[in-house]
Amino acid sequence: MKLQRNAVSFSLGPQNTDRACVLVHNVGGSPLEMRGLGEYLAQQGIRVRGISLTGHDGDLENLAQVERGAWLEMIAQEVEALEAYPYVFLGGFSIGSVLAILSALDFGQQIAGVIAMSTPMRLFQESSFPFGDYFAKHRQPLAEYALKDSCVRHDILTSIRLLDPKGVEELSEDEILEIALKEARYPSALWRQMTALVRELRARLRELVTPLLIIQGKQDALNPHESASELYRKAVYAPKSLHWLERSGHFVMDDLEHEQLCFLCASFIQDIVRHNRLSG
């Protein structure tokens, strides 16, 4: 079985509002990761754009040909398309949040705030993702994880269900995990692009002055908890807050505390708009 990745972007919420948010999925993922959060934000009167990053047509070999600058350019185009909205926010998941923060650095005061969920701060190091030989043509990162670990299983199962919910709805957990291991054979070129993005983020974080909401699941088996603390610590000049979701794994948008996450994100946006109105 081959997974059918849902790469369809979405637009939600009222157009006649003063606030908008661009949601950026993980590299190798799909806009479906962000759909639930997007629907909640739309209900709160926020215009939402859930984008499908360049190269996400379901073929990982094609995705490996995309330079990271193309992803940043796509986000830039979305931000520019929302210039009529006084308050534009960016929200990202995993590498998507790295892209969101880098985009906020490029746009400066045009971005009202950034939501960073499950953000990796280090790749290809012993203290982070055990992705094996960096110079191999392909990588199979999931093969390095202990699949009997309940947290690991939970995060991997969630990732596959978000990629292709209809395709795996009648399969057992073991069958889904078997598919995940077969599918997760990523070109090393793709991992190198992600590594470069994370390195750039670490190098530039001190420049960030945009308000930042950091959300991290305490049960995350794919992203070290130190990443959230490091992100908070290195964003020296940004107004920021760090929220831990005690029962959630890597995919915080679709886990046990997704309602709390949605509330945190909406409150972050509404509070910034309210504060700016009062101070303006």
Image (cartoon, rainbow, N blue to C red):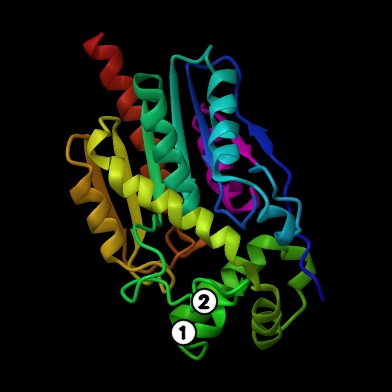
How crowded is the residue under tag 1: few (<14 C-alpha within 10 Å), some, or many (20+)? few
Whether residue 9 sits left or right of residue 37 in the image: it is: right
Residue position for label 2: 154
Which residue appears at 70% of the width and 60% of the height? 60
Q: Residue at x 40, y 52 (%)?
A: 198
Say which residue label 1 marks: 150
- Does the CB distance between marks 1 and 2 fall below 8 Å? yes
- As measured in the structure, the alpha-carbon distance from the residue carrying label 1 to the one carrying label 2 is 6 Å
Q: Is residue 256 above or below residue 171?
A: above
What amino acid type should be assigned to the residue bearing mark 1?
Ser
- Classify residue 74 as left or right of residue 249: right
**Residue in the foreground of this view, choosing between 130 and 211:** 130
The answer to whether residue 29 is left or right of residue 234 is right
Specify the quadrant that holds the N terminus: bottom right
Numbered badge on residue 191: none
Specify whether residue 46 is painted magenta: yes
Q: Residue at x 43, y 77 (%)?
A: 130
Which amino acid lies under the numbered mark 2 shown in the image of this protein?
Answer: His
- Secondary structure beneath disc 1? helix
Q: Point out residue 140 in the picture as x, y percentages from the top left corner.
A: 59, 77
User: What span is colored magenta in the figure?
Assistant: 31-51
Q: Position of residue 108 (x, y in %)?
A: 35, 23
Which residue is depicted at the point 25% across and 33% down?
A: 207
- Classify residue 187 by image quadrant: bottom right
Q: Is residue 39 left or right of residue 256?
A: right
How dense is the environment of label 2, judged by Cα within 10 Å: few (below 14), some, or many (20 and up)?
many
Residue 148 percent location from the top left of the image: 50, 91
Secondary structure under badge 2?
Answer: helix
Q: Is residue 253 visible?
A: no
